[in-house]
Amino acid sequence: MKWSKLKHTMEECFADEVKGRVHIYTTKYTAGSNFMVRGWITIDKEEIANFSTPDNHARFDHSSPDYIERIPDGQRTPGKAAEKGEFAQWELADSCLQYINQSIDDSLSSNNPVIRAFAMLDRRTGKRRLLSLETADMHPLVKRMYDLRMETMGKPKGKVSDEN
């Protein structure tokens, strides 16, 4: 599927309150190179996640570990949705393709934080379901999208676990 069609299909899945605010992009920086590529996600024109293949390969030496093993919580930058080099551009495109071809339940339970982040924005994820989600262990990208949805619905952010 061409990227333009995939991007359109993805953004059409978004809930009305976030449509036009969240956008997904990809680019190739040099003709003929499949390595110098990146993707990014913006909210209100601010880039919140960078899917740079060169940065990803530099960080993980050409062998990205499982999502849960990539960046330990203690090494994350507070307030960042994704760390530099955490994801490659192909992971964004692959996540989009997987996302449009699976159920919302599968997306919400995916171990892929990119797919789960898209599920937070999906119109099929209703208010009750969002309010029932546990946010304490969410990947920062998923949490950022969750917070956006909660903000647009005028609801309090995230259900906190038994930490308090």
Image (cartoon, rainbow, N blue to C red):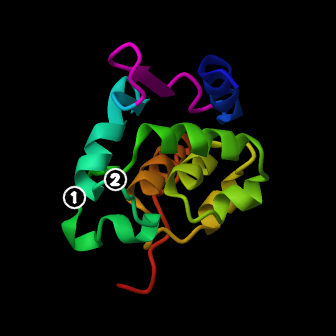
Identify which residue is drawn at 52% across, 50% down: 114
Mark 2 secondary-structure assignment: loop
Q: Residue at x 65, y 35 (%)?
A: 14
Tell me the SS state at disc 1.
Answer: loop
Expressed as whole percent of the image width and height from the top left, the position of residue 86 reads 33, 52
* Residue at the farthest top position: 31
Residue 124, disc: none
Relative placement, left or right, of 154 versus 36 is right
Point out the image quarter for the N terminus: top right
Circle 2: residue type: His
Q: Position of residue 43 (x, y in %)?
A: 41, 31
Q: Is residue 25 magenta?
A: yes
Numbered label tally: 2
Q: Which residue is mark 1?
A: 78
- Picture coordinates of residue 149, whole percent (x, y): 54, 45
Asked whether 142 or 84 is in front, the reply is 84
Determine if residue 84 is in view.
Answer: no
- Give the magenta-colored segment's residue range: 17-34
Image quadrant where residue 78 sits: bottom left
Q: Which mark is residue 62?
A: 2
